[in-house]
Amino acid sequence: MEKDILPMPPLYYWTIGLVDKFCSFRYPFVLAAILVLGFASLAKYFISLFYLKSQEIDFRAHSWFSGMLVFGLMFFFPVYVYVFEGLYWYLGKFTPNVWHNSTTIFVFPFSIALFFVSLEWIGSPKQKWWWAQLLLGVLVLSIKPSFLFVFIPALPLIDLLKRKRFDQNFALTVLLSGMLLGGVFFQKYLIYHQNPFTDQVFGVSAKSEIILAPFEVWDFYVENKFQDVATSFLFVFAGIFLMGKRLWNDWHFQYALIMVLGAISIYFLIAESGTRMLDANFYWQIPISLFILYLVFVKHLLFEIQSVPKLKDLPWKTQMLLFLYSLHVFSGMLYLIRLLWLDKYH
């Protein structure tokens, strides 16, 4: 990673380079990448667990089952109908977990932490939470800014919906979003106009711009629009229908849903021109936002689980949701097996 061709944003690559100086084995950067991404995945799990514990969930109730439910979230994927799947199994669907994109894996825990801290800021505005958001926002910007595309507009919107007043704290929320938005635009300038990485590695012809291209990238990757949407959001649709008002009254759910809808809208509408269009670089806010949404769903499932003395006493609606949840997790495990052992080229 020569300094003059360092990709932007740089923090992931700097981290890999730094770790490689102390933990190199046989091939450059391979062990470092395994360690860094492994740490990020563990951090993703423990930050998610911390969020759930902060919601006063008692994991002593059916502890093994509750623990497996949270752990399963790390493998939650669209339901794959293997007989009917085509060549593209990823960017045509909508997944809350990623194993193909290293920078997204690395930025995941920082993004979830940013979501968690923003909940603290809106729920109890204190200066420390504002600064924590700014710090985490800068870290996300320095790794992969995708999540900020939806966080920046969603934060003041949910602040206004939750607290219902224009005051000094709301002004600070808008200021924070504005500062992060400025960082995004500055990074855009560096990536598209000042970064030598593209010219030196891919050639001048690979230069791209951000363009409005409705559905163009998704249309390339989607196999069957109805099937891919249905299998991606089976649990979401069922959860909204079966949980109903209790779910809609949770402002955490409202916040996460706003981000998911924004994330999908960006992917559907915006792309890069030229040779980078099919890289689908405006997809990666979707997995992070979806993961947060499913994390909120898991919170409600855990509330149901801890409210009954025996699992067999759960309402049929909850049992149905747990079955669908297991189906998504099982599909994710099968997909990972396929990715690692059965077919390295899809």
Image (cartoon, rainbow, N blue to C red):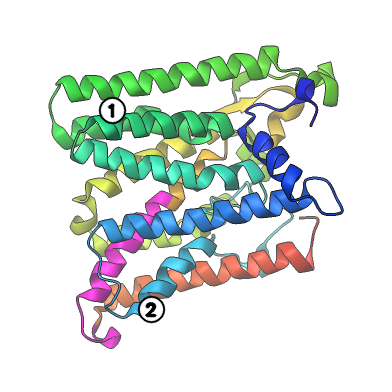
Residue located 75% across and 42% down the image: 21
Q: Residues within 10 Å of mark 2 (few under 14, many from 20)?
A: some
Label 1 to label 2: alpha-carbon separation: 37 Å
Q: Against 52, is 127 above or below?
A: above
Please, what secondary structure does the residue beneath circle 2 have? helix
Residue located 74% across and 23% down the image: 274
In the rendered image, which quarter is residue 299 located in?
bottom left
**Residue type at tag 1:** Pro
177 left or right of 124 in image = right
146 left or right of 20 in image = left
Q: Contact (CB < 8 A) between labels 1 and 2?
A: no
Figure quadrant of the C terminus: bottom right
Instruction: Please tell me how many numbered marks the rendered image carries.
Output: 2
Residue 156: which numbered mark, if any? 1
Q: Which residue is mark 2?
A: 65
Q: Which residues are magenta?
A: 292-313
Residue at the extreme front = 22
Whether residue 293 appears in magenta in the rendering, the answer is yes
Q: Main secondary structure of the magenta part?
A: helix
Residue located 46% across and 37% down the image: 263
